[in-house]
Amino acid sequence: MTARNFDAIVIGAGQAGPSLAGRLNDAGMKVAIIERHLVGGTCVNTGCKPTKTLVASAYAMHTARRGAEYGFAFNGTVEVDMVKVAARANKVILDSREGNETWLAGMANVELIRGHARFASSHTVVVGEQELTAPLIFVNVGGRAIIPDMPGIGDVPILTNTDIVALDELPRHLIVIGGSYIGLEFAQMYRRFGAQVTIIERHERLIMREDADISEEVRSILEREGVTVETGAGQISFEKHNDEIAVRFASDHRASPVIGSHVLMATGRRPNTDDLGLEVAGILTDERGYITVDDHLQTNVAGVFALGDCNGRGAFTHTAYNDFEIVAANLLDGEDRAVSQRLVGYGLYIDPPLGRVGMTDAEAEKSGRRLLYSKRAMTRVGRAVEKGESQGFMKIVADADTRRILGAAVLGTGGDEAVHGILDMMNADQTIDTLRWAVPIHPTVSELVPTLLLDLRARSH
């Protein structure tokens, strides 16, 4: 086998891979980008793009059912056509994927190679019958859903996020195993489509990463729409029940199983690193399979980098893209960018959405700082009231001595957008006083942020 030599090899065409290939191409480097399945990765094919398209369809249906609240009548029922809903999401996928493929094809120095890549040595990769070598190798292989080893799980059909975005039928009863971000979005979405929905979560509350008040409010939002939430569920097991699925679990208040037509497994994700031959290359991983990287995203092998979900340094499309930005800035622009410099925000796309940045209250309290807190219900936000979408609240925690914001959450209409004003101020290392004197546009959700800052107080104990 004769080796083909490149200046750089990119393994995986997800969020970071094509963008990095583009920068390397512009620098005149000869690049091989390898993809074993679908160009665009999780975000384009089974993640952000299709799920937010489905969320939008569910939102439109939910709003239509609320017509009387807005002063119009609808003589009939709002019924979902899942074939059309799925087709709309699929078109978004295909358009995005095609856009990525066309973009790559237009790069003069980049070759897209289809197949599964495995390391043959620290700087040699084998794809089928081809052997490729390069002084720079970038691993961008993403992740996949975890299927935990629960009793009976192999005896019943199970959906993951990959399967459910392509579902073109309405479940009679969708059972969601896992009460975190992915599970909650699909739970509300399918309830709005018209399915019965039950969430089963082993912890005592939903989204354990968040503060308890956010967990409780999210639960209330879902339950008001008819989603059943079972928390503190232990010993989860599965068995066939005629043509459906019975899910049993230990609970202080429920003895009988939940009977559903479909089960969505939303219990976390794992990196796609188990079949890359990393051990042959001497590339280290942690106990969960994430590739170990330094602050510049380089592995323990010089010239080999890991970007995106497979490095354990971020689980979002925007952190994967920022990985690309860091690597490109350091290698091509002479900068010294580091992962530790970034401040990560994220969203939970139920309706209303949650926009989050920085520390939770609980994390801030563990830091030992003197703290200031402020919290306001969305019922006090004019824009939310005007839209008839006043569920939720916004809150901020700040350092009393440095007068820097430590964290914020906006759980309410437009929360995923409104949080960016706070995120930007935190990135710019500005004080509370700087943001307090901003003059936000009226009427918006963001206009309450300066008022929220004026209300910052020490919490009485």
Image: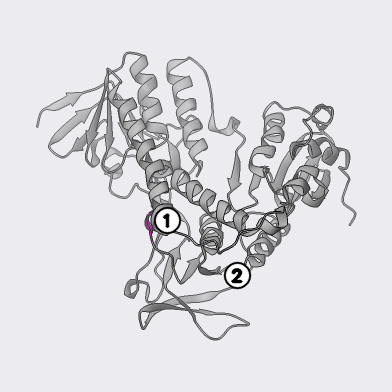
Asked if residue 64 lies left or right of residue 155, the reply is: right
Kind of element beneath mark 2? strand
Can you tell which mark lies on residue 271? none
Question: At 51% from the left edge and 78% from the top edge, which residue is drawn?
Answer: 249
Kind of element beneath mark 1? helix
Look at the numbered discs 2 and 1 and tell me whether their residues touch, using CB distance below 8 Å: no
Residue 295 in view here? yes
**As rendered, which of 45 and 189 lies closer to the eye?**
189
Give how far across and how far down residue 106 sits, in percent.
30, 21
Question: At 49% from the left edge and 26% from the top edge, which residue is drawn?
Answer: 326
Give how far across and how far down residue 396 sits, in percent.
77, 43
Q: For the residues marked 2 and 1, what is the alpha-carbon distance in whole angstroms?
A: 19 Å
Relative vertical location of residue 18 with respect to residue 388 in this rendering, above or below: above
- Per the rendered image, the range of residues in magenta is 162-168
Identity, as a three-letter code, of the amino acid under mark 2: Val
Give how far across and how far down residue 207 sits, in percent.
61, 58
* Residue carrying label 2: 229
Residue 289 in view here? no
Question: At 72% from the left edge and 29% from the top edge, which residue is drawn?
Answer: 425
Give how far across and how far down residue 361 sits, in percent.
74, 50
Task: Work out which quarter of the rendered image holds the C terminus and state it.
Answer: bottom right
**As rendered, which of 188 and 359 lies closer to the eye?**
188
Identity, as a three-letter code, of the amino acid under mark 1: Asn
Quarter of the image holding residue 280? Answer: top left
- 353 within the magenta span: no
Can you tell which mark lies on residue 161? 1
Question: At 59% from the left edge and 83% from the top edge, which residue is drawn?
Answer: 254
